[in-house]
Amino acid sequence: MTNLRQARLDDHWRTAFKRKYPLFLQNMEFTEGEVFGETKLTLKPGMNAIVGKNGIGKSNFIRAIYNSLKSDSSNRQKFSKLLDKSKIKFDLIISGENCSLELSPFEKNEIEQDILCLLFDPCTLIPEIQKLFVQQENLNELLESFSPNQLSVDELKLANFITNTEYSSIEVINIEDEYESFPMLPFFSVERGEVRYDSRDMGLGELSLLYYFWIVDYIGKSKSNSLLIIEEPESFLPPLIQNRLCDVLAMTLATKGIACLISTHSEHILRKIPRSHVHIMSRVLNRIRFFNAASNIEQMDVLGLTAPKKGLLFYEDEAALFFARSLIKASPLFVSDSFLYHCSGSEGDVLQDLKRFPVSLDEFSFIAVFDGDCRGKMDDQLMDFENYIFLPSALSPEEHLISYLGGIDIVDVANHIGKPIELMSAAIDVAAGSDHHDYFVDIAKVLSIPYEELFSKLCDLWVGDENNSESVQEFIGKLETLAA
């Protein structure tokens, strides 16, 4: 029986970004085209999202991928009109085996591997198929030549959840090989209360959601290595339903192991997708380029797609803030702007804020971030709380980084900061013996860069050091548990 409780759906979201997938579309590279030629995109396992301005070419990019990977079992025919005639090289991992495919969107490609590619693009798809049904003169005779499928209780439960409706019954007739553009096309008849109607009479949003239910069910029952491509699923849908659509998508990925590539303009669609899985499509010097949203937050802001806030982190001072933000950037689920930040002022003030703030509100957590030197000092005061976390080490952030710098090559430090080795060495000599609160301020003055920039870069250097990966993962794991 399908469990649609929010807590279970949240579990599916976590699983979707941690599990292994039988099909992993790693890289794609477009060649020869005037628009997409030399365009490269590197993906993450599972779900990936593409964002970008209107008119940048997302639809044609998506359709070129679909055309290339389409098989006889796909849900619609190839698109005949695309912006250019690029060819695409795909690097994939299928059931643990690496393979490369060089395909053309306009040719019939012979793909030996068992790949099922489906496309859900409601903005163009749904009006087109409704028009087909409305204009079909002998539709009733046509429907009688196919066997109807009555949804089971469990299937009806899922369809009602997706559509936010209470249907008493749904009947689906899969029309095969009748329409040139659609090898298989579902026709829906529904009953709600005492009213019965079908695909011809539905609003576009309702028909879109039922088709989405059908395509998720279809791909979930397939034994093939599956890729679901979705273009602007938010079309015709209010925010609540967009959230439900995404919850069902995460459940499908987590339980069925399908891969998904989705393009969207909606914050609600992106709400639970880690920024490391979001790719910004841009035009640079008349060429299409992709940038990862995790490291290009400003471009997301320009598009009006800010990261959903997962909670408030409250901490002692600036050093703790910079250290925490660097650690968060290493998370696959969050980016640094996934949180709001509040400087409490001291460890005692952090404790007072922990006592006065609630543990959480609706999908928003309050988390105390203590310096590492608070470990073991506050056990009695923290006994009644769980929503707190310690920064790595048993020292304050400044003392911890001073110790770290003493054990690594100054060449690596200078290269990371972007300053000459001689200047970096002189700056460290000037700061020698300073109080740890002043140490990095003194170095920053010699280097002629802001303290904030220096300390943030040094935190990034520590986080990126593979010798510290265990401590980094411990912090991230605790944060994800508290803020998920």
Image (cartoon, helix red, strand yellow):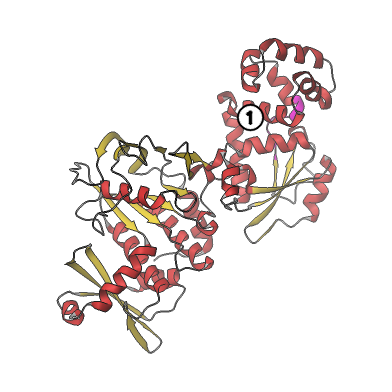
- State which quadrant residue 402 falls in: top right
- Location of mark 1 (residue): 460
* Camera-nearest residue between 323 and 152: 323
**Which residue range is magenta in the image?**
390-399
Badge 1: few (under 14), some or many (20 or more) residues near its Cα, within 10 Å? some
- State which quadrant residue 399 falls in: top right
Q: Going by the image, does 320 lie left or right of 233? A: right
- Above-or-below relation of 87 to 157: above
Direction bottom: furthest residue: 194
Residue 461 within the segment the image draws in magenta: no
- State which quadrant residue 329 falls in: top right
Residue 396 within the segment the image draws in magenta: yes
Q: Going by the image, does 57 lie left or right of 352? A: left
Q: Identify the amino acid type marked 1.
A: Asp
* Camera-nearest residue between 254 and 412: 412
Q: Going by the image, does 461 lie left or right of 448? A: left
Residue 366 at what x, y percent from top left? 71, 52
Residue 112 at what x, y percent from top left? 19, 41
> Image quadrant for the N terminus?
bottom left
Residue 438 at what x, y percent from top left? 83, 25
Q: Main secondary structure of the magenta part?
A: loop
Looking at the rendered structure, the secondary structure element under dot 1 is helix
- At horizontal 36% and vertical 44% (from top left) the residue drawn is 21
Q: Going by the image, does 267 lie left or right of 441? A: left
- At horizontal 38% and vertical 56% (from top left) the residue drawn is 230
- At horizontal 44% and vertical 64% (from top left) the residue drawn is 235
